Image (spheres, grey):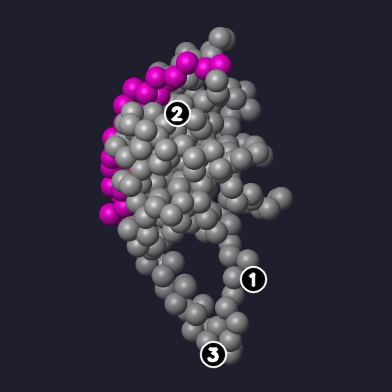
Amino acid sequence: MSFAARSAVAPQVASVAPARRAAGAVCRAAPSDSAVPQGSRREVLQGAALLAASLAAGPASAAAKKPKGYNICRDDNDNYTFLYPFGWQEVSVDGLDVCYKDVIEPLESVSVSLVLTDKESVDEFGTPLEIADTLVATALSNKRQKTKVLDAKRVERQGRPYVEFEFLAEAPNYTRHALGVVTVSNGKFYIVSTGANERRWGKMQKKVKTVVDSFEILYGNPAA
């Protein structure tokens, strides 16, 4: 990997400033009262009507095509949604915006983290392989793990570019087989990681692939 590509991603990953979810809040977050613009009653009502119309006309997402056996995580504050398998529970983890995991098989999990960025598109961080290599080495594993990126590709959803990748993280007593997806929207770099123990990959592969494929930015210009 080139120094330029690594320096484009790694410093921002290292300076993660996640928007922590308020205690007791559910993933299907609603805008707070402080987000309501000040103005006349007429202006507020007009704004509410426009917001309702935009929500109703929003792009088809995981919420509109939820398969059996999955729950929906939708965060309107941070502007994303994804599916996760029924039975996974939300847990609080420092540095993550949200995390769900299986209480019996803790390696089976999904997490979302947010990094502030001045980039307008994930394409500005480098090639899919460069992005995957950097994230796996600096943000999605620890120094005791041996990692290997198996695949990385660029995809588009609703006109927005995403990078999907697959990797292994080998520790002394287990190997995690994982999938990731990243994108950029409105000054935020979204990092999603999900996976399972390698010994259960045959059973879990389809489920975690559904998680990655379902992740979408809710609203906004694809270039923003």
Write the residue at 60% across / 82% down: 38
Write the residue at 52% across / 55% down: 78
Local SS, label 1: helix
Q: Going from the N terminus, do you reach mark 3 or mark 1 first? A: 1
Tag of residue 136? 2
Q: Going from the N terminus, do you reach mark 3 or mark 2 first? A: 3
Q: CA distance from mark 3 to mark 1?
A: 18 Å
Taking the image as shown, residue 193 lies to the left or right of residue 32, namely left
Question: Which residues, given as a range, are shown in magenta?
Answer: 144-168
Decide which of 13, 190 is in the foreground and name it.
Answer: 13
Residue 164: tell me if it is visible.
no
Residue 68 forms part of the magenta stretch: no
Q: How far across and down, in percent of the image, does residue 19 sit? A: 60, 51
Identify the residue position indicated by label 1 in the image: 34
Please name the amino acid that badge 1 sits on: Ser
Q: CA distance from mark 2 to mark 1?
A: 37 Å
